[in-house]
Amino acid sequence: MTTISVGSDAIQNLDLATIEIAIESWLAQHPRQFDLEIKFSIDYPQDPQDPRELSEIPEIRLWFLRLDAHYPYLPLLLDWQAGELARYVAMLIPHQFSLKDGIQYNPEALELWVMHRVFLLTNWLQHQQLQGIDRLKFMTQMLGYELDDGLFALLET
Protein backbone atom coordinates (compact mmCIF):
# COMPACT_ATOMS: atom_id res chain seq x y z
CA MET A 1 0.00 0.00 0.00
CA THR A 2 1.15 3.52 -0.81
CA THR A 3 -0.18 6.43 1.22
CA ILE A 4 0.00 9.79 -0.49
CA SER A 5 -0.31 12.87 1.70
CA VAL A 6 -2.16 15.78 0.19
CA GLY A 7 -1.89 19.08 2.02
CA SER A 8 -3.93 22.24 1.79
CA ASP A 9 -1.25 23.99 -0.31
CA ALA A 10 -1.46 21.27 -2.96
CA ILE A 11 -5.25 21.48 -2.90
CA GLN A 12 -5.34 25.27 -3.14
CA ASN A 13 -2.81 25.29 -5.99
CA LEU A 14 -4.22 22.23 -7.79
CA ASP A 15 -0.73 20.77 -7.44
CA LEU A 16 -0.36 17.08 -8.35
CA ALA A 17 3.40 16.86 -7.79
CA THR A 18 3.21 14.47 -4.83
CA ILE A 19 1.09 11.94 -6.62
CA GLU A 20 2.96 12.37 -9.90
CA ILE A 21 6.17 11.27 -8.22
CA ALA A 22 4.55 8.23 -6.63
CA ILE A 23 2.63 7.07 -9.68
CA GLU A 24 5.29 7.75 -12.30
CA SER A 25 8.05 5.97 -10.36
CA TRP A 26 5.78 3.01 -9.63
CA LEU A 27 4.61 2.73 -13.24
CA ALA A 28 8.20 2.84 -14.45
CA GLN A 29 9.02 -0.15 -12.24
CA HIS A 30 5.72 -2.07 -12.58
CA PRO A 31 4.08 -1.05 -15.87
CA ARG A 32 1.82 -4.10 -16.06
CA GLN A 33 0.53 -4.33 -12.49
CA PHE A 34 -2.40 -2.76 -10.68
CA ASP A 35 -1.36 -3.45 -7.10
CA LEU A 36 -0.09 -0.06 -6.00
CA GLU A 37 -3.11 0.27 -3.67
CA ILE A 38 -2.99 4.03 -3.22
CA LYS A 39 -4.54 5.55 -0.15
CA PHE A 40 -4.89 9.32 0.30
CA SER A 41 -4.20 11.16 3.52
CA ILE A 42 -5.83 14.55 3.14
CA ASP A 43 -4.69 17.31 5.47
CA TYR A 44 -7.11 20.16 4.96
CA PRO A 45 -7.92 22.50 7.85
CA GLN A 46 -11.58 22.77 8.75
CA ASP A 47 -13.37 24.80 11.34
CA PRO A 48 -14.41 22.43 14.14
CA GLN A 49 -17.98 23.64 13.62
CA ASP A 50 -17.89 22.71 9.91
CA PRO A 51 -19.95 19.50 9.59
CA ARG A 52 -18.96 18.78 5.97
CA GLU A 53 -17.20 15.63 4.89
CA LEU A 54 -14.04 16.16 2.82
CA SER A 55 -15.95 15.19 -0.32
CA GLU A 56 -18.31 18.10 0.30
CA ILE A 57 -15.58 20.75 0.23
CA PRO A 58 -15.39 22.34 -3.24
CA GLU A 59 -11.63 22.93 -3.17
CA ILE A 60 -10.91 19.29 -2.42
CA ARG A 61 -13.36 18.08 -5.05
CA LEU A 62 -11.74 20.38 -7.62
CA TRP A 63 -8.31 18.92 -6.81
CA PHE A 64 -9.71 15.42 -7.29
CA LEU A 65 -11.31 16.43 -10.58
CA ARG A 66 -7.92 17.60 -11.82
CA LEU A 67 -6.33 14.40 -10.53
CA ASP A 68 -8.95 12.32 -12.33
CA ALA A 69 -8.41 14.22 -15.58
CA HIS A 70 -4.65 13.71 -15.31
CA TYR A 71 -4.79 10.03 -14.26
CA PRO A 72 -8.07 8.55 -15.54
CA TYR A 73 -6.78 5.04 -14.76
CA LEU A 74 -6.20 5.91 -11.09
CA PRO A 75 -9.30 4.04 -9.84
CA LEU A 76 -7.54 0.80 -10.86
CA LEU A 77 -4.62 1.66 -8.56
CA LEU A 78 -6.55 2.60 -5.42
CA ASP A 79 -6.74 0.58 -2.21
CA TRP A 80 -10.31 -0.62 -2.64
CA GLN A 81 -10.38 -2.60 0.60
CA ALA A 82 -9.61 0.56 2.57
CA GLY A 83 -12.59 2.31 0.96
CA GLU A 84 -10.52 4.51 -1.34
CA LEU A 85 -12.58 3.72 -4.42
CA ALA A 86 -15.80 4.80 -2.70
CA ARG A 87 -14.15 7.98 -1.41
CA TYR A 88 -12.59 8.73 -4.79
CA VAL A 89 -15.93 8.36 -6.57
CA ALA A 90 -17.56 10.56 -3.91
CA MET A 91 -15.12 13.30 -4.83
CA LEU A 92 -16.36 13.16 -8.43
CA ILE A 93 -20.05 12.21 -8.20
CA PRO A 94 -22.90 14.05 -6.45
CA HIS A 95 -23.92 12.15 -3.34
CA GLN A 96 -25.49 12.29 0.10
CA PHE A 97 -24.54 10.71 3.39
CA SER A 98 -26.92 8.60 5.40
CA LEU A 99 -26.15 7.44 8.93
CA LYS A 100 -28.03 4.23 8.20
CA ASP A 101 -26.85 3.47 4.65
CA GLY A 102 -23.58 5.38 4.35
CA ILE A 103 -22.78 7.14 1.11
CA GLN A 104 -25.59 7.35 -1.42
CA TYR A 105 -24.43 8.40 -4.88
CA ASN A 106 -26.75 10.12 -7.32
CA PRO A 107 -27.79 7.03 -9.33
CA GLU A 108 -27.80 8.68 -12.76
CA ALA A 109 -24.48 10.40 -12.19
CA LEU A 110 -22.91 7.19 -10.93
CA GLU A 111 -24.20 5.22 -13.90
CA LEU A 112 -22.78 7.78 -16.33
CA TRP A 113 -19.43 7.85 -14.51
CA VAL A 114 -19.19 4.05 -14.41
CA MET A 115 -19.96 3.62 -18.09
CA HIS A 116 -17.65 6.47 -19.09
CA ARG A 117 -14.91 4.89 -16.99
CA VAL A 118 -15.54 1.46 -18.55
CA PHE A 119 -15.21 2.91 -22.05
CA LEU A 120 -12.17 4.99 -21.15
CA LEU A 121 -10.32 2.25 -19.26
CA THR A 122 -11.10 -0.51 -21.74
CA ASN A 123 -9.56 1.68 -24.44
CA TRP A 124 -6.60 2.60 -22.21
CA LEU A 125 -5.94 -1.05 -21.31
CA GLN A 126 -5.98 -2.02 -24.99
CA HIS A 127 -3.55 0.76 -25.93
CA GLN A 128 -1.23 -0.23 -23.08
CA GLN A 129 -1.58 -3.90 -24.09
CA LEU A 130 -2.60 -4.74 -20.53
CA GLN A 131 -4.89 -7.46 -19.26
CA GLY A 132 -7.08 -5.67 -16.73
CA ILE A 133 -10.66 -6.29 -17.77
CA ASP A 134 -11.27 -8.55 -14.75
CA ARG A 135 -10.11 -5.80 -12.40
CA LEU A 136 -12.26 -3.28 -14.26
CA LYS A 137 -15.27 -5.59 -13.93
CA PHE A 138 -14.57 -6.02 -10.22
CA MET A 139 -14.36 -2.24 -9.83
CA THR A 140 -17.81 -1.83 -11.39
CA GLN A 141 -19.17 -4.59 -9.14
CA MET A 142 -17.90 -2.72 -6.09
CA LEU A 143 -19.99 0.22 -7.27
CA GLY A 144 -23.09 -1.94 -7.73
CA TYR A 145 -22.91 -2.76 -11.45
CA GLU A 146 -22.71 -6.20 -12.99
CA LEU A 147 -21.46 -5.86 -16.56
CA ASP A 148 -21.85 -8.64 -19.07
CA ASP A 149 -18.79 -10.03 -20.83
CA GLY A 150 -20.58 -9.25 -24.09
CA LEU A 151 -20.07 -5.54 -23.47
CA PHE A 152 -16.32 -5.99 -23.23
CA ALA A 153 -16.30 -8.22 -26.31
CA LEU A 154 -18.19 -5.49 -28.17
CA LEU A 155 -15.69 -2.85 -27.00
CA GLU A 156 -12.72 -4.94 -28.14
CA THR A 157 -13.89 -4.97 -31.76
Image: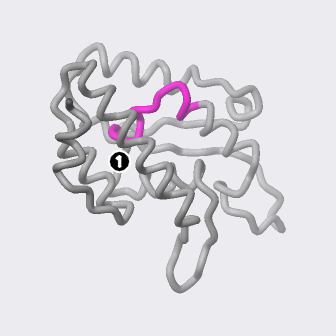
When the figure is inspected, residue 131 is found, relative to residue 87, above or below; the finding is above
**Towards the viewer: 61 or 106:** 106
Q: Residue furthest top?
A: 28
**Towards the viewer: 74 or 40:** 74
- Whole-percent x, y for residue 60 in the image: 69, 44
Whether residue 83 is in magenta: the answer is: no
- Coloring applied to the structure: one colour
Whether residue 73 is in magenta: the answer is: yes
Q: Quadrant of residue 78?
A: top left
Q: Residue at x 41, y 48 (%)?
A: 115
Question: Position of 70 compared to 51: left or right?
Answer: left
Q: Quadrant of residue 17?
A: top right
- Whole-percent x, y for residue 103 in the image: 54, 70
Q: Residue at x 32, y 41 (%)?
A: 37
- Whole-percent x, y for residue 50 in the image: 81, 64
When the figure is inspected, residue 88 is found, relative to residue 14, above or below; the finding is below
Q: What secondary structure do most residues of the magenta stretch adopt?
A: helix
When the figure is inspected, residue 12 is found, relative to residue 42, above or below; the finding is above
Report the magenta residues as a range.
67-77
Q: Residue at x 58, y 82 (%)?
A: 99
Label 1 secondary element: loop
Report the number of discs: 1
Question: Position of 35 compared to 23: left or right?
Answer: left
Q: Which residue is mark 1?
A: 79
